[in-house]
Image (spheres, rainbow, N blue to C red):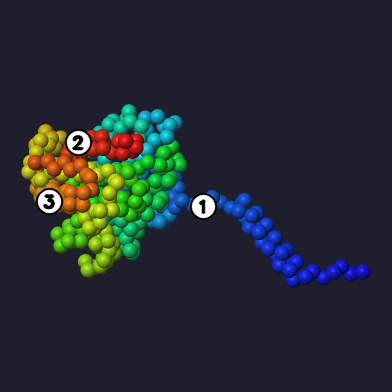
Amino acid sequence: MSAPRPTLRTVVILLVITVIGAWCAAAVTAEPASIGARVDDVRTESDRVLDVGVYSESMKSVTRVRVLRAADPTQPAPTLYLLNGANGGISDGSWIDRTDVAEFFRDKQVNVVVPFGGASSYFTDWRTDDPVLGRQRWTTFLTRELPPLIDSEYNGNGANAIAGISMAGTSVFQLALAAPGLYKAIGSYSGCVRTSDPQGKVIVSAVVGGRRGNVMNMWGPPSDPAWAANDPYLHADQLRGTKIYVSTGNGLPGQYDTLAGADGSGIELAYQLVFGAPLEAVTGICAAQLRDRLRALAVPATFVLRPNGTHSWHYWQDDLHDSWNLIGAALSGD
């Protein structure tokens, strides 16, 4: 006696069971979802500093990142990201070698992360690769790739803040706007946030062109809406709820604009006076404009507009120290 032929309904049920079973088996054996970045290598520079190579899926390359571990690495800690300026920290100094950042944070329960690279990139996602500067996907790296990796590898607790100098003093605002809630506090030292007014377009083009990058590859021609979309001044109302610290001098010689303040180097002093003075005069104007803008919008912010000072590391070290009260409180939830 032959077995009864299965009905169409039975065949469909068997197929569904087979598909679900295969799917479940695949789910059990599948690799974890990629977060877009991974640790490529780690070099111990000192008891305080790790030089970590981070592979970025978005940039298809390894970015060097200095990680200063929290005072007690066994306990969860927030993370402060410190961005270098237009040189990307590759030349002419960085937070690590031009300030006391390692000593200042030695007793503090916070991971400090200093990325290297991104010279003249504004730490943003460029729309196309640049023949000279290469692939720049810094917004993706600093908002979606690096923070979860730091948390998982170095016991981060998910609370983040970000601060930067000069060019990066603009970028910290752009990054906070790109990822609302990711950064509880931002520190902008000698930065100019306006990018889409005539003066801002000149400044941005000069910074990018200073290392032979083509600003068209970043945001397109000056008429492109991307310039306004990346202008924190125009979107300042969206910063409500983020702790903000802004500092700058005005270009007039200050306490560090002497031979002693320039570490005894006549070359460094000449740079501070010839180049650093006019740069700081511009950032001073920009900071005052942002202060007035935030006041008009009733967005709380701390502004330190010094009556003197040039575009140089001694002032930025002081700014970091001074802003830590605000940033540290934000990271601790106060």
* Label 1 or label 3, whichever comes before in sequence order: 1
- Residue 253 against residue 128 in the figure, above or below: above
The image position of residue 201, as x and y in percent, is 18, 61
According to the picture, the residue beneath numbered tag 2 turns out to be 318
Q: Quadrant of the C terminus?
A: top left
According to the picture, the residue beneath numbered tag 1 turns out to be 33
Amino acid type at mark 2: Asp
SS at badge 2: helix
* Label 1 or label 2, whichever comes before in sequence order: 1
According to the picture, the residue beneath numbered tag 3 turns out to be 285
Quadrant hosting residue 79: top left
| Residue at figure coordinates x 33%, y 64% from the top left | 128
Specify whether 149 is left or right of 114: right
The image position of residue 299, as x and y in percent, is 23, 48
Amino acid type at mark 1: Ala
Q: Are marks 1 and 2 in contact (CB under 8 Å)?
A: no
The image position of residue 164, as x and y in percent, is 25, 45
Which class describes the residues within 10 Å of circle 1: few (<14), some (14-19), or many (20+)?
A: few
Amino acid type at mark 3: Ile
In front of the other: label 3 or label 2?
Answer: 3
| Residue at figure coordinates x 11%, y 33% from the top left | 260
SS at badge 3: helix
SS at badge 1: loop
- Residue 82 against residue 120 in the figure, above or below: above
| Residue at figure coordinates x 27%, y 31% from the top left | 104
Q: Which mark is residue 278?
A: none
| Residue at figure coordinates x 33%, y 54% from the top left | 178
Q: Quadrant of the N terminus?
A: bottom right
Of residues 271 and 249, the one drawn nearer to the viewer in this rendering: 249
Kindly give the residue lying farthest to the right in the view shown: 1
